């Protein structure tokens, strides 16, 4: 088991089961995480792209969230650089509606080594008292016919990131 897979499993065991696994079968899954924010939409998305400041180091390959970056433009990369000069492309930005929505594609964590692809839609909506950010991640492919086993782990990991993001955004992380 890889270090990242072990970290995903540890998060699953440490976090109450989420009701946000929308679908799971041997070759595909869909998960959703939604978080209420006390900041306006534009500020929420500005905070979101500062991924290296709020993502958990436990869900990186390098052990440091400071090595993460997100270039919020079509073709941009949600990447992680390694101290030895290597790195990984976690997701690729394929769609951006500034201040409102972003779609990233790719395979997260241990899914990278499987014949799987995914799409993560990140939306920010205006709500009373602030905004709401929703992560929708769908992955499909071979996944050694175990995609439904990844669904709760990915859901728990994204749930952890959503909580961390909410804390970061509330502290003014998206203010310019």
Image (cartoon, grey):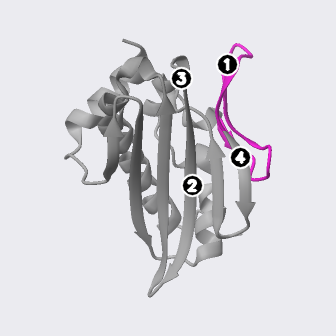
Which residue extends farthest bottom?
128
Q: Are dots 3 and 1 in contact, CB under 8 Å?
A: no
Distance of label 1 from label 2 (alpha carbons): 30 Å
Secondary structure of the residue carrying numbered label 4: strand
At a point 24% along the width and 54% down the height, the residue shown is 19
Label 2 vs label 3, nearer the camera: 2
Q: Are dots 4 and 1 in contact, CB under 8 Å?
A: no
Q: Position of residue 12 (x, y in %)?
A: 26, 36
Q: Is residue 147 magenta?
A: no
Decide which of tag 3 and tag 4 comes sooner along the chain: 3
**Residue 33 position (above or below residue 25):** below
Classify residue 58 as left or right of residue 94: left
Distance of label 3 from label 4 (alpha carbons): 20 Å
Secondary structure of the residue carrying numbered label 2: strand
Distance of label 4 from label 2 (alpha carbons): 10 Å
Decide which of tag 4 and tag 1 comes sooner along the chain: 1
Residue pointed to by mark 1: 83
Classify residue 154 as left or right of residue 46: left
Is residue 59 at all visible to an observer of this figure? yes
Residue pointed to by mark 2: 121
Residue pointed to by mark 3: 61
At a point 44% along the width and 62% down the height, the residue shown is 166
Decide which of tag 1 and tag 2 comes sooner along the chain: 1
Distance of label 2 from label 3 (alpha carbons): 23 Å
Residue pointed to by mark 4: 93
The magenta stretch spans which residues?
Answer: 68-91
């Amino acid at each position: 088991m890889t270090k990242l897979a072990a970290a995903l499993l540890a998060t699953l065991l440490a976090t109450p089961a989420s009701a946000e696994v929308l679908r799971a079968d041997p070759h595909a899954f869909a998960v959703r995480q939604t978080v209420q924010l006390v900041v306006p939409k534009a500020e929420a998305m500005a905070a979101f792209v500062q991924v290296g400041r709020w993502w958990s180091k436990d869900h990186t390959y390098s052990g440091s969230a400071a090595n993460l970056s997100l270039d919020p433009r079509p073709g941009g990369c949600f990447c992680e650089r390694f101290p030895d000069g290597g790195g990984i492309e976690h997701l690729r930005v394929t769609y951006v509606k500034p201040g409102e929505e972003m779609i990233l594609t790719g395979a997260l964590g241990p899914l990278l080594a499987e014949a799987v692809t995914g799409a993560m839609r990140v939306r920010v909506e205006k709500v009373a008292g602030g905004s709401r950010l929703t992560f929708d991640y769908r992955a499909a492919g071979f996944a050694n016919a175990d995609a439904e086993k990844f669904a709760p782990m990915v859901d728990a990991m994204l749930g952890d990131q959503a909580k961390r993001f909410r804390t970061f955004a509330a502290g003014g992380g998206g203010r310019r």
